[in-house]
Protein backbone atom coordinates (compact mmCIF):
# COMPACT_ATOMS: atom_id res chain seq x y z
CA UNK A 1 0.00 0.00 0.00
CA UNK A 2 1.33 3.45 -0.90
CA UNK A 3 1.82 5.74 2.08
CA UNK A 4 0.07 9.12 1.98
CA UNK A 5 1.13 12.08 4.11
CA UNK A 6 -1.65 14.42 5.20
CA UNK A 7 -0.56 17.88 6.32
CA UNK A 8 -2.81 19.70 8.77
CA UNK A 9 -1.91 23.20 9.95
CA UNK A 10 -3.98 24.16 12.99
CA UNK A 11 -4.40 27.43 14.85
CA UNK A 12 -7.04 27.79 17.57
CA UNK A 13 -9.13 25.13 15.86
CA UNK A 14 -10.45 23.46 19.00
CA UNK A 15 -14.07 23.99 17.95
CA UNK A 16 -13.71 22.01 14.72
CA UNK A 17 -10.57 19.89 14.67
CA UNK A 18 -11.93 16.67 16.21
CA UNK A 19 -14.24 16.15 13.22
CA UNK A 20 -11.29 16.63 10.85
CA UNK A 21 -9.10 14.20 12.75
CA UNK A 22 -11.90 11.63 12.98
CA UNK A 23 -12.29 11.72 9.20
CA UNK A 24 -8.60 10.86 8.85
CA UNK A 25 -8.66 8.09 11.44
CA UNK A 26 -11.54 6.43 9.52
CA UNK A 27 -9.95 6.48 6.07
CA UNK A 28 -10.32 3.23 4.12
CA UNK A 29 -6.76 3.74 2.88
CA UNK A 30 -5.01 3.02 6.16
CA UNK A 31 -1.36 3.59 5.20
CA UNK A 32 -1.26 7.26 6.11
CA UNK A 33 0.76 9.57 8.30
CA UNK A 34 -0.98 12.66 9.58
CA UNK A 35 1.41 15.47 10.41
CA UNK A 36 -0.43 18.04 12.51
CA UNK A 37 1.39 21.34 12.88
CA UNK A 38 0.04 23.42 15.74
CA UNK A 39 0.76 27.03 14.79
CA UNK A 40 1.16 28.30 18.39
CA UNK A 41 -2.50 27.90 19.33
CA UNK A 42 -3.75 29.53 22.52
CA UNK A 43 -6.89 27.38 22.92
CA UNK A 44 -7.28 23.64 23.55
CA UNK A 45 -6.06 22.60 20.08
CA UNK A 46 -2.75 21.14 21.42
CA UNK A 47 -4.62 19.01 23.98
CA UNK A 48 -6.93 17.56 21.32
CA UNK A 49 -4.00 16.81 19.01
CA UNK A 50 -2.12 15.07 21.82
CA UNK A 51 -5.14 12.89 22.60
CA UNK A 52 -5.34 11.65 19.00
CA UNK A 53 -1.59 11.07 18.80
CA UNK A 54 -1.74 9.00 22.00
CA UNK A 55 -4.48 6.79 20.52
CA UNK A 56 -3.18 6.40 16.95
CA UNK A 57 0.52 6.22 16.07
CA UNK A 58 -0.20 7.50 12.56
CA UNK A 59 -0.75 10.97 14.03
CA UNK A 60 2.38 13.08 14.58
CA UNK A 61 2.37 16.49 16.27
CA UNK A 62 4.69 19.43 15.66
CA UNK A 63 4.17 22.48 17.87
CA UNK A 64 5.46 25.85 16.68
CA UNK A 65 6.32 28.47 19.29
CA UNK A 66 5.45 31.42 17.04
CA UNK A 67 2.32 31.83 14.92
CA UNK A 68 3.60 32.09 11.34
CA UNK A 69 0.68 31.20 9.08
CA UNK A 70 -0.48 28.14 7.15
CA UNK A 71 2.21 28.15 4.46
CA UNK A 72 5.09 28.09 6.95
CA UNK A 73 3.34 25.52 9.14
CA UNK A 74 2.70 23.18 6.21
CA UNK A 75 6.30 23.53 5.02
CA UNK A 76 7.47 22.48 8.48
CA UNK A 77 5.42 19.31 8.13
CA UNK A 78 6.39 18.76 4.49
CA UNK A 79 10.06 18.72 5.48
CA UNK A 80 9.55 15.53 7.51
CA UNK A 81 6.90 13.86 5.30
CA UNK A 82 7.69 10.28 4.32
CA UNK A 83 4.66 9.44 2.15
CA UNK A 84 4.77 8.77 -1.58
CA UNK A 85 1.89 11.22 -1.99
CA UNK A 86 1.00 14.37 -0.05
CA UNK A 87 -2.27 16.21 0.50
CA UNK A 88 -3.53 18.70 3.05
CA UNK A 89 -6.64 18.94 5.18
CA UNK A 90 -7.55 22.15 6.95
CA UNK A 91 -8.42 21.78 10.61
CA UNK A 92 -12.06 22.76 10.09
CA UNK A 93 -12.69 20.55 7.04
CA UNK A 94 -13.11 16.80 6.65
CA UNK A 95 -12.70 13.97 4.13
CA UNK A 96 -15.22 11.34 3.11
CA UNK A 97 -14.04 7.91 4.38
CA UNK A 98 -12.81 6.80 0.93
CA UNK A 99 -11.31 10.11 -0.22
CA UNK A 100 -7.66 9.12 0.07
CA UNK A 101 -8.27 5.63 -1.35
CA UNK A 102 -9.94 7.05 -4.45
CA UNK A 103 -7.19 9.61 -5.01
CA UNK A 104 -4.45 6.97 -4.76
CA UNK A 105 -6.36 4.77 -7.21
CA UNK A 106 -6.13 7.55 -9.83
CA UNK A 107 -2.34 7.66 -9.50
CA UNK A 108 -2.21 3.91 -10.01
CA UNK A 109 -4.30 4.10 -13.17
CA UNK A 110 -1.77 6.26 -15.00
CA UNK A 111 1.95 6.64 -14.30
CA UNK A 112 1.90 10.13 -15.83
CA UNK A 113 -0.60 11.49 -13.31
CA UNK A 114 1.20 13.75 -10.84
CA UNK A 115 -1.73 15.49 -9.14
CA UNK A 116 -5.31 14.39 -8.42
CA UNK A 117 -8.16 16.74 -7.53
CA UNK A 118 -10.68 15.82 -4.86
CA UNK A 119 -14.41 16.44 -5.29
CA UNK A 120 -14.90 19.58 -3.19
CA UNK A 121 -18.19 20.05 -1.36
CA UNK A 122 -18.77 23.53 0.05
CA UNK A 123 -20.51 23.21 3.42
CA UNK A 124 -22.82 26.05 4.50
CA UNK A 125 -24.37 24.62 7.63
CA UNK A 126 -27.55 22.89 6.49
CA UNK A 127 -26.77 23.49 2.82
CA UNK A 128 -23.96 22.10 0.69
CA UNK A 129 -22.82 22.69 -2.90
CA UNK A 130 -20.31 20.93 -5.13
CA UNK A 131 -17.54 23.17 -6.46
CA UNK A 132 -18.39 23.70 -10.15
CA UNK A 133 -15.80 22.07 -12.39
CA UNK A 134 -15.39 21.59 -16.15
CA UNK A 135 -16.00 18.06 -17.41
CA UNK A 136 -12.70 16.18 -17.67
CA UNK A 137 -11.00 12.99 -16.58
CA UNK A 138 -7.40 14.21 -16.88
CA UNK A 139 -5.82 17.45 -18.04
CA UNK A 140 -2.31 18.27 -19.25
CA UNK A 141 -0.52 20.07 -16.45
CA UNK A 142 -0.23 23.33 -18.36
CA UNK A 143 -3.96 23.41 -19.06
CA UNK A 144 -4.73 22.74 -15.39
CA UNK A 145 -2.38 25.58 -14.50
CA UNK A 146 -4.18 27.97 -16.83
CA UNK A 147 -7.57 26.98 -15.39
CA UNK A 148 -6.28 27.44 -11.85
CA UNK A 149 -5.31 31.07 -12.50
CA UNK A 150 -9.02 31.94 -12.38
CA UNK A 151 -9.93 28.97 -10.15
CA UNK A 152 -12.01 27.39 -12.89
CA UNK A 153 -10.62 24.29 -11.23
CA UNK A 154 -10.03 24.36 -7.48
CA UNK A 155 -6.83 23.85 -5.53
CA UNK A 156 -7.63 20.93 -3.25
CA UNK A 157 -5.71 17.88 -4.39
CA UNK A 158 -3.13 15.19 -3.73
CA UNK A 159 0.26 15.31 -5.42
CA UNK A 160 3.43 13.27 -5.60
CA UNK A 161 5.70 14.03 -2.64
CA UNK A 162 8.74 14.53 -4.89
CA UNK A 163 6.93 17.25 -6.82
CA UNK A 164 5.62 18.89 -3.64
CA UNK A 165 9.06 19.01 -2.07
CA UNK A 166 10.45 20.55 -5.26
CA UNK A 167 7.84 23.29 -4.91
CA UNK A 168 7.12 23.85 -1.20
CA UNK A 169 4.50 26.34 -0.08
CA UNK A 170 5.06 29.97 -1.07
CA UNK A 171 5.53 31.90 2.19
CA UNK A 172 5.39 35.38 0.62
CA UNK A 173 2.30 36.20 2.71
CA UNK A 174 0.52 34.68 5.68
CA UNK A 175 -2.57 34.19 3.53
CA UNK A 176 -3.20 33.38 -0.13
CA UNK A 177 0.37 32.89 -1.35
CA UNK A 178 0.07 29.13 -0.76
CA UNK A 179 -2.45 29.22 -3.62
CA UNK A 180 0.53 29.92 -5.86
CA UNK A 181 2.05 26.59 -4.87
CA UNK A 182 -1.03 24.78 -6.10
CA UNK A 183 -0.66 26.43 -9.49
CA UNK A 184 3.01 25.55 -9.73
CA UNK A 185 2.22 21.93 -8.87
CA UNK A 186 -0.29 21.80 -11.71
CA UNK A 187 2.18 23.42 -14.11
CA UNK A 188 4.88 20.91 -13.16
CA UNK A 189 2.49 17.93 -13.45
CA UNK A 190 2.50 15.80 -16.56
CA UNK A 191 -1.19 15.11 -16.03
CA UNK A 192 -3.75 16.29 -13.49
CA UNK A 193 -6.58 13.87 -12.73
CA UNK A 194 -9.64 13.94 -10.53
CA UNK A 195 -11.39 11.50 -8.23
CA UNK A 196 -14.74 11.10 -6.49
CA UNK A 197 -13.27 11.34 -3.00
CA UNK A 198 -15.00 14.20 -1.23
CA UNK A 199 -13.30 17.04 0.58
CA UNK A 200 -15.88 18.84 2.71
CA UNK A 201 -14.90 22.52 2.85
CA UNK A 202 -16.59 24.30 5.76
CA UNK A 203 -17.66 27.89 5.06
CA UNK A 204 -17.86 30.07 8.17
CA UNK A 205 -17.08 33.62 9.20
CA UNK A 206 -14.29 32.63 11.59
CA UNK A 207 -12.00 31.35 8.83
CA UNK A 208 -8.95 33.47 8.03
CA UNK A 209 -10.16 34.29 4.53
CA UNK A 210 -13.52 35.55 5.82
CA UNK A 211 -12.34 37.46 8.90
CA UNK A 212 -12.14 41.25 8.98
CA UNK A 213 -8.36 41.60 8.94
CA UNK A 214 -5.65 43.49 7.09
CA UNK A 215 -4.40 40.07 6.00
CA UNK A 216 -7.12 40.20 3.35
CA UNK A 217 -4.85 42.56 1.39
CA UNK A 218 -2.20 39.83 1.23
CA UNK A 219 -3.96 38.48 -1.84
CA UNK A 220 -2.60 41.39 -3.87
CA UNK A 221 1.00 40.67 -2.87
CA UNK A 222 0.45 36.95 -3.47
CA UNK A 223 -0.80 37.79 -6.97
CA UNK A 224 2.40 39.76 -7.63
CA UNK A 225 4.47 36.82 -6.39
CA UNK A 226 2.60 34.50 -8.76
CA UNK A 227 3.39 36.75 -11.71
CA UNK A 228 7.06 36.96 -10.72
CA UNK A 229 7.31 33.18 -10.44
CA UNK A 230 5.71 32.71 -13.86
CA UNK A 231 8.22 35.12 -15.37
CA UNK A 232 11.13 33.33 -13.65
CA UNK A 233 9.92 29.94 -14.90
CA UNK A 234 9.59 31.19 -18.46
CA UNK A 235 5.82 30.72 -18.69
CA UNK A 236 4.43 31.88 -22.04
CA UNK A 237 3.77 35.62 -22.11
CA UNK A 238 0.19 35.06 -23.25
CA UNK A 239 -0.47 33.16 -20.00
CA UNK A 240 1.12 35.91 -17.88
CA UNK A 241 -0.87 38.58 -19.72
CA UNK A 242 -4.00 36.47 -19.29
CA UNK A 243 -3.50 36.57 -15.52
CA UNK A 244 -3.75 40.39 -15.34
CA UNK A 245 -7.59 40.54 -15.53
CA UNK A 246 -7.77 38.24 -12.49
CA UNK A 247 -5.34 40.46 -10.61
CA UNK A 248 -7.52 43.45 -11.52
CA UNK A 249 -10.66 41.76 -10.21
CA UNK A 250 -8.83 40.92 -6.98
CA UNK A 251 -7.86 44.59 -6.66
CA UNK A 252 -11.52 45.61 -7.04
CA UNK A 253 -12.48 43.05 -4.39
CA UNK A 254 -9.78 44.43 -2.07
CA UNK A 255 -11.20 47.93 -2.42
CA UNK A 256 -14.71 46.63 -1.70
CA UNK A 257 -13.39 45.07 1.52
CA UNK A 258 -11.67 48.36 2.40
CA UNK A 259 -14.85 50.32 1.66
CA UNK A 260 -17.08 48.03 3.73
CA UNK A 261 -14.75 47.25 6.65
CA UNK A 262 -12.03 49.93 6.70
CA UNK A 263 -13.50 51.53 9.84
CA UNK A 264 -13.08 48.23 11.67
CA UNK A 265 -9.33 48.18 10.99
CA UNK A 266 -6.62 49.97 12.96
CA UNK A 267 -5.12 53.10 11.35
CA UNK A 268 -1.88 51.30 10.46
CA UNK A 269 -3.89 48.46 8.93
CA UNK A 270 -5.86 50.88 6.77
CA UNK A 271 -2.58 52.49 5.70
CA UNK A 272 -1.16 49.07 4.80
CA UNK A 273 -4.26 48.17 2.81
CA UNK A 274 -4.21 51.42 0.85
CA UNK A 275 -0.49 51.02 0.14
CA UNK A 276 -1.00 47.46 -1.14
CA UNK A 277 -3.85 48.52 -3.39
CA UNK A 278 -1.80 51.40 -4.80
CA UNK A 279 1.18 49.10 -5.42
CA UNK A 280 -1.06 46.59 -7.19
CA UNK A 281 -2.70 49.33 -9.29
CA UNK A 282 0.70 50.50 -10.52
CA UNK A 283 1.97 46.96 -11.12
CA UNK A 284 -0.96 45.57 -13.15
CA UNK A 285 -0.51 45.86 -16.91
CA UNK A 286 -3.67 47.77 -17.75
CA UNK A 287 -3.08 47.33 -21.48
CA UNK A 288 -3.71 43.62 -20.90
CA UNK A 289 -7.19 44.19 -19.48
CA UNK A 290 -10.07 43.21 -21.79
CA UNK A 291 -12.20 45.90 -23.41
CA UNK A 292 -15.27 44.42 -21.71
CA UNK A 293 -14.14 46.00 -18.41
CA UNK A 294 -14.74 49.46 -19.89
CA UNK A 295 -18.43 48.56 -20.03
CA UNK A 296 -18.60 47.40 -16.40
CA UNK A 297 -19.13 50.15 -13.80
CA UNK A 298 -16.47 50.25 -11.11
CA UNK A 299 -14.03 48.21 -13.18
CA UNK A 300 -12.68 50.78 -15.61
CA UNK A 301 -8.86 50.97 -15.82
CA UNK A 302 -8.68 54.68 -14.98
CA UNK A 303 -5.56 56.59 -16.13
CA UNK A 304 -4.48 57.76 -12.66
CA UNK A 305 -4.53 56.30 -9.15
CA UNK A 306 -6.65 59.18 -7.81
CA UNK A 307 -9.26 58.70 -10.51
CA UNK A 308 -9.31 54.98 -9.77
CA UNK A 309 -9.98 55.70 -6.07
CA UNK A 310 -12.71 58.18 -6.97
CA UNK A 311 -14.34 55.64 -9.27
CA UNK A 312 -14.27 52.91 -6.62
CA UNK A 313 -15.60 55.20 -3.88
CA UNK A 314 -18.50 56.31 -6.09
CA UNK A 315 -19.27 52.79 -7.29
CA UNK A 316 -19.35 51.15 -3.87
CA UNK A 317 -21.14 54.11 -2.29
CA UNK A 318 -23.94 53.62 -4.82
CA UNK A 319 -23.94 49.91 -4.05
CA UNK A 320 -24.33 50.82 -0.37
CA UNK A 321 -27.44 52.83 -1.17
CA UNK A 322 -29.02 49.88 -2.97
CA UNK A 323 -27.84 47.31 -0.41
CA UNK A 324 -25.56 45.54 -2.87
CA UNK A 325 -22.35 45.39 -0.79
CA UNK A 326 -23.52 42.87 1.79
Image (cartoon, rainbow, N blue to C red):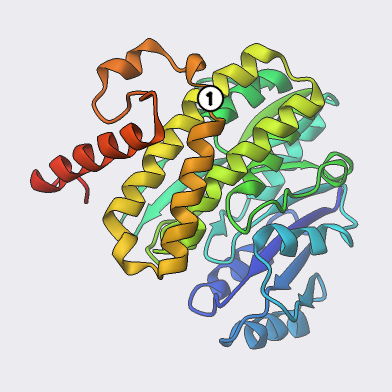
Badge 1: residue crowd in 10 Å (few <14, some 14–19, many ≥20):
many
- Percent across and percent down for residue 28 are 69, 55
Count how many numbered circles sit on residues in the image: 1
Residue at point 74% right, 50% down? Answer: 169
Which image quadrant is residue 65 in? bottom right
As displayed, is residue 244 above or below residue 28? Answer: above
- Percent across and percent down for residue 193 are 68, 28
Looking at the image, can residue 189 be seen?
no
**Disc 1, SS:** helix
Looking at the image, can residue 252 be seen?
yes
Q: Closer to the camera, 182 or 231? A: 231
As displayed, is residue 30 above or below residue 111? Answer: below
Residue at point 38% right, 42% down? Answer: 253
Asked whether, in this view, residue 283 is left or right of residue 191, the answer is left
Residue at point 49% right, 50% down? Answer: 275
Q: Closer to the camera, 180 or 232? A: 232
- Percent across and percent down for residue 91 are 58, 66
Which image quadrant is residue 36 in? bottom right
Asked whether, in this view, residue 180 is left or right of residue 130, the answer is right
Residue at point 44% right, 38% down? Answer: 251
Q: Closer to the camera, 288 or 2? A: 288
Q: Which residue is mark 1?
A: 244
Query: Which residue is at the far left?
Result: 322
- Percent across and percent down for residue 33 are 81, 63
Amino acid sequence: MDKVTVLMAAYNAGKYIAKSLDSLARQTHTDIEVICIDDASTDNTPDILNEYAAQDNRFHIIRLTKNSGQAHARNTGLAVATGKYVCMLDADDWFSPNAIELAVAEFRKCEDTDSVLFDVVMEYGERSEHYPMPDFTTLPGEEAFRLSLTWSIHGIYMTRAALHKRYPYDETCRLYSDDNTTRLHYLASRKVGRCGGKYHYLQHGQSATHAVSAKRFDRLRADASMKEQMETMGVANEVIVGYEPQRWLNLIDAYMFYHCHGKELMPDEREYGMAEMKRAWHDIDKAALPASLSRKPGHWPMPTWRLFLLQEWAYFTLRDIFGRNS
